[in-house]
Image (cartoon, rainbow, N blue to C red):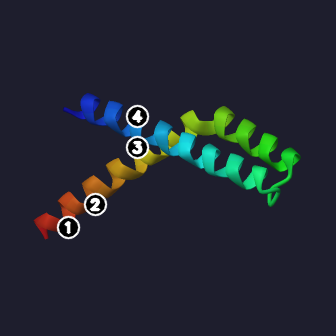
Amino acid sequence: SKLTHIKKLKKTFISFCDSLLLALEQLLESSILSLKTFIKFNFEIKKNWHGIFINIINFEDELESYLRTDEKR
């Protein structure tokens, strides 16, 4: 069902964010990234992840309906 799919998508997205932040932490440790940038980025992701997630779902819906109308042609 759509709800299960959305839950799965959300879980995937959250783990994606986690690995993104982990990668940034590693960059920070190798001092390629400044602490200020990291903190700002971390904050932005945490603040906006819900909005980003909603956009992904909307995009997926759009794509699905586009593919359906494309099949009908």
Residue 16 at x, y = what percent?
49, 45
Please name the residue shown 14% across and 65% down the image.
71
The answer to whether residue 54 is seen in the rendering is no
Q: Residue at x 41, y 52 (%)?
A: 59
Check disc 4: other Cα within 10 Å, few if <14, some if 14-19, many if 20+.
Answer: few
Q: Answer with mark 2 or mark 4, whichever residue precedes in sequence.
A: 4
Quarter-of-image position of residue 46: top right
Per the image, the residue denoted by label 1 is 70
**Image coordinates for residue 49, horizontal then vertical, percent:** 58, 37
Q: Nearer the viewer, mark 2 or mark 4?
A: 4
Q: CA distance from mark 3 to mark 2?
A: 14 Å
- Describe the element under mark 3 as helix, strand or loop: helix
Q: Tell which of 41 and 23 is nearer to you.
A: 23
Residue named by callout 4: 11
Q: Secondary structure at mark 4?
A: helix
**Disc 3 from disc 1: Cα separation:** 20 Å
Residue receiving disc 3: 57
Whichever of callouts 4 and 1 sits on the residue coming sooner in the sequence is 4
Q: Residue at x 54, y 45 (%)?
A: 19
Nearest the viewer among 49 and 19 is 19
- As helix, strand or loop, the secondary structure at mark 2 comes to helix
Label 2 amino acid?
Tyr
CA separation in Å, label 4 and label 1: 30 Å
* Separation (CA) of disc 2 from disc 4: 25 Å
Instruction: Name the residue at 36% across, 39% down.
Output: 9
Q: Earlier in the sequence, mark 4 or mark 3?
A: 4
Question: Is 59 located above or below residue 10 in the figure?
Answer: below
Query: In the rendered image, which residue does mark 2 sit on?
Result: 66
Quadrant where the N terminus sits is top left
